[in-house]
Amino acid sequence: MINKQSLWFVTLFSLILVLSIYYVTISDNSLEKILGNNLEETALVSNETTLSSELVALRVKEDEEVLKEMENYQQILLDSTKTSEEKSDAYNSLMTLNSKKGQEQEMEEAIKKEYQLDSFVKIKDNNITITVSTNEHNANLANNIIRTIRQMTDKERYITVKFQE
């Protein structure tokens, strides 16, 4: 059965996900109205850490998909007509989804730490797709990234590295 603490965790995680998607998609004009004239100071910092627009688009798309899945599972959890087995399956799926998202973030952080490259990681079934934002496209870098990610996984997975400029 689902306890209140788990339900609150899922609810708060969903809220954070929605707010992060909103923040990524908000226009500069709206942001300027919200923040006032402090936008110039933050622009200097954000220029240093700009991500490829393709990586941002991939992240937003993935976040939207995750949000839809989470909403479906939450509806099952809150539906009084569903059986306890269906609710248990939905809860387990939510936890798996959350765990997968955590693994993706850990892998992105490892690539950032070790290679100083911005990346996007997507785990689907036994496949891991890594999109790296760099001007350097060589097999040696791809092999090193694959080795790093393979050390982080507990089971054998098919790993693909794509380069984006």
Image: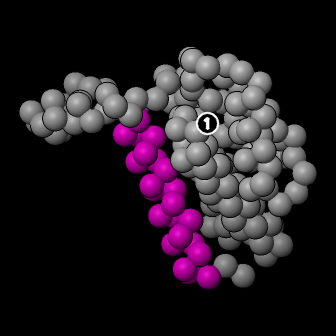
Crowd band around label 1 with a 10 angstrom C-alpha radius: few (<14), some (14–19), many (20+): many
**Foreground residue, 52 or 35?**
52
In this rendering, the answer to whether 8 lies above or below 163 is: below
Q: Quadrant of residue 22?
A: top left
**Foreground residue, 45 or 55?**
45
Residue matched to label 1: 120
**Foreground residue, 149 or 90?**
149
Q: Amino acid at mark 1?
A: Phe
Residue farthest toward the left in the current orientation of the protein: 37
| Residue 90 visible within the image | no
Quadrant housing the N terminus? bottom right
Query: Residue at point 83% right, 72% down?
Result: 85
The location of residue 31, given as percent across then percent down, is 23, 33
Residue farthest toward the front in the current orientation of the protein: 140
The answer to whether residue 32 is left or right of residue 135 is: left
Q: Main secondary structure of the magenta part?
A: helix
Quadrant housing the C terminus? top right
Dot 1: element = strand
The location of residue 131, given as percent across then percent down, is 66, 30
**Foreground residue, 5 or 129?**
129
Q: Quadrant of residue 112?
A: top right
Query: Residue at point 34% right, 31% down?
Result: 48
Q: Which residues are magenta?
A: 3-24
Q: Is residue 155 magenta-colored?
A: no
The location of residue 18, given as percent across then percent down, is 46, 47
Q: Quadrant of residue 28?
A: top left
Q: Is residue 21 magenta-colored?
A: yes
Q: Please say which color scheme the image uses.
A: one colour
In this rendering, the answer to whether 20 lies above or below 75 is: above
The answer to whether residue 141 is left or right of residue 59 is: right
